[in-house]
Amino acid sequence: MIYLYVKTHNVTGLKYLGKTVKNPYTYKGSGKYWKRHIEKHGYDVTTQILLETDDPLELSNYAKIYSTENDVVGSK
């Protein structure tokens, strides 16, 4: 199973979009900016699963739509 998720830091409101084949609730994420943020502010995070699938193409398509609708690339 592949998971597409959004993690939200409960103190700062920073959001992190990611995918994993691990347990998305225990997996903390791997982005450099995200990891530095967690080091600075602690791991007080809520995880929201956007999609669970076995199909990488379905995951990719959904992630692109979500990213575009939420301006993930342009957002701080």
Image (tube, rainbow, N blue to C red):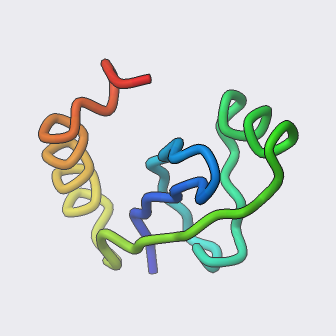
Q: Is residue 33 left or right of residue 67?
A: right
- Choose top left, top right, bottom left or bottom right for residue 6: bottom left
In the depicted structure, whether residue 8 falls above or below residue 1: above
Q: Residue at (77%, 45%) from the top-left corner?
A: 38
Q: Residue at (52%, 56%) from the top-left corner?
A: 8
Q: Residue at (31%, 69%) from the top-left corner?
A: 50
- Choose top left, top right, bottom left or bottom right for residue 75: top left
Residue 55: where, in percent of width, then height? 28, 70
Residue furthest out toward the right: 39
Residue 46: where, in percent of width, then height? 56, 69
Q: Quadrant of the C terminus?
A: top left
For the residue pair 14 and 49, the one nearer the viewer reads as 14
In the depicted structure, whether residue 2 falls above or below residue 35: below
Q: Is residue 29 left or right of residue 2?
A: right
Q: Quadrant of the N terminus?
A: bottom left
Residue 67: where, in percent of width, then height? 24, 40
Q: Residue at (13%, 40%) from the top-left corner?
A: 69
Residue furthest out toward the top: 74
- Choose top left, top right, bottom left or bottom right for residue 10: bottom right
Residue furthest out toward the front: 11
Q: Is residue 65 left or right of residue 74?
A: left
In the depicted structure, whether residue 60 falls above or below residue 2: above
For the residue pair 42 and 3, the one nearer the viewer reads as 42
